[in-house]
């Protein structure tokens, strides 16, 4: 644990150094190809730094923050676009937004109604999620005696709660220290009424926000010239899911260090095709005045996500023992905190 934390600290010192270079030097270079060339060494480092870590949690989070989000933000920054342009006047804001899954909340236009993502969530809900996650970690010890359907639900809940709570723990100190509003990362995905609602408005919104300007909008804009707006939108959605699948395959490689089997790519391609089909069907249904009640559509969406997740999303992780490793790391972390905390308190009292 000591060696892993030391490597983690070295990795993030390197990250901060690279982002200081981007802030002080690359930002002074004219936007476009020249600025992109100037940050290519930083992008290269971002891709290799997660390989310095072996912990599934530390490596997974670092690769998600740097390779998935950080590189896309820097690519937008090369052309003077994206969240880093807004944060550029302050280096601390620049580094935080470039290296963490956060975005400054933009004010809604006066005529626009507040969306559900802007609503304040009760604090008891967060505490309930922490309690449920702790129970799930404990239940993992007895999964051999559990029904397979219950295990599917267990893995889905663990993935959702673990990801959301980590992002909340990161965003809360940033919000407190800097005093600015941060866009929420999740919007209760279990309340989704469609795949479009799940992926576009509720699940891991940091990814949605970065895919929109880097993949969806350019593809839609270019495709409209050739195939019209409806087909262009479908092509943009499919491309966004394809890129997401590729990035998830890369994340899996960092965590497992095993060549990809492309199951998770198939998961996102399947969901992309189904989302496009769903939008087309909903358009026809609304035109005829038909609409599924949310009490029906909600469970159908969650069942589809869970079943396809167990079929295509989780197998590569389970085959390589990432679930057992992740649960073991919780125990190592607790032991590490218990063994070091008394020593630190003793040193501070002297």
Image (cartoon, rainbow, N blue to C red):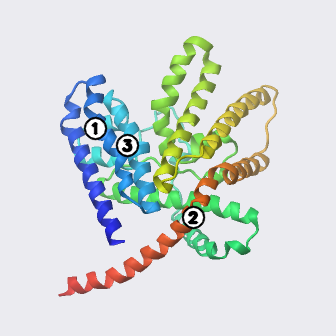
Q: List the single residue furthest toward the top.
A: 226
Label annotation for residue 41: 1
The spot of residue 221 in percent (x, y) is 51, 19
> Looking at the picture, how far across and down is residue 111, in whole percent?
50, 32
Crowd band around label 1 with a 10 angstrom C-alpha radius: few (<14), some (14–19), many (20+): few
Name the residue at 57% across, 63% down.
Answer: 321
For this rendering, which residue is in front, 295 or 61?
A: 61
| Relative to 305, 62 lies left or right | left
Q: CA separation, marks 3 and 2?
A: 26 Å
Q: Is 24 left, or right, of 345 in this rendering?
A: left
Within the image, what quadrant is residue 168 found in? Answer: bottom left
Between 6 and 72, the one nearer to me in the picture: 6
Placement of 1 over or under 278, stated as above or below: below
- Label 2 neighbourhood size at 10 Å, few (<14), some (14-19), many (20+)? some
Precedes in sequence: disc 3 or disc 2: 3
Which mark, residue 146?
Answer: none
Secondary structure beneath disc 2? helix
Q: Secondary structure at mark 3?
A: helix
- What is the number of the mark on residue 70? 3
What residue is at 57 percent from the left and 16 percent from the top? 224
Q: CA distance from mark 1 to mark 2?
A: 34 Å
Classify residue 336 as left or right of residue 316. Answer: left
Residue 32 appearing in the image? no
Q: Which residue is mark 2?
A: 323
- The image quadrant that residue 197 belongs to is top right
Contact between marks 1 and 2 (CB within 8 A): the answer is no
Point out residue 247 in the picture as x, y percentages from the top left corner: 50, 42
């Amino acid at each position: 644990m000591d060696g892993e934390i030391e490597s983690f600290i070295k990795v993030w010192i390197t990250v901060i150094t690279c982002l200081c270079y981007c802030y002080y030097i690359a930002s002074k270079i004219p936007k476009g190809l020249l600025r992109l060339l100037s940050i290519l060494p930083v992008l290269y480092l971002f891709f290799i730094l997660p390989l310095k870590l072996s912990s599934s949690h530390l490596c997974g989070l670092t690769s998600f923050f740097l390779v998935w989000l950080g590189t896309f933000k820097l690519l937008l920054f090369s052309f003077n676009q994206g969240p880093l342009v807004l944060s550029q006047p302050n280096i601390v804001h620049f580094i935080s937004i470039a290296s963490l899954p956060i975005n400054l909340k933009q004010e809604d236009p006066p005529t626009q109604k507040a969306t559900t993502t802007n609503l304040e969530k009760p604090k008891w809900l967060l505490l309930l999620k922490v309690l449920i996650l702790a129970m799930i970690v404990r239940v993992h010890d007895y999964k051999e005696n559990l029904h397979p359907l219950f295990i599917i639900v267990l893995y889905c809940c663990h993935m959702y709660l673990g990801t959301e709570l980590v992002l909340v723990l990161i965003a809360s100190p940033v919000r407190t220290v800097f005093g600015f509003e941060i866009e929420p990362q999740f919007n209760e995905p279990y309340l989704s009424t469609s795949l479009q609602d799940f992926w576009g408005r509720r699940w891991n919104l940091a990814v949605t926000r970065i895919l929109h300007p880097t993949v969806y909008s350019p593809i839609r804009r270019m495709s409209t010239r050739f195939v019209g707006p409806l087909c262009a939108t479908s092509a943009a959605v499919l491309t966004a899911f394809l890129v997401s699948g590729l990035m998830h395959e890369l994340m899996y490689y960092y965590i497992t260090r095993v060549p990809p089997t492309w199951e998770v790519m198939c998961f996102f391609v399947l969901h992309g095709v189904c989302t496009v089909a769903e939008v087309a069907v909903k358009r026809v249904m609304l035109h005829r005045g038909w609409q599924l009640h949310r009490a029906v559509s909600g469970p159908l969406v969650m069942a589809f996500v869970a079943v396809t997740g167990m079929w295509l999303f989780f197998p590569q992780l389970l085959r390589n023992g990432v679930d057992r490793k992740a649960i073991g790391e919780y125990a190592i972390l607790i032991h590490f905190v218990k063994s070091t905390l008394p020593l630190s308190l003793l040193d501070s009292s002297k």
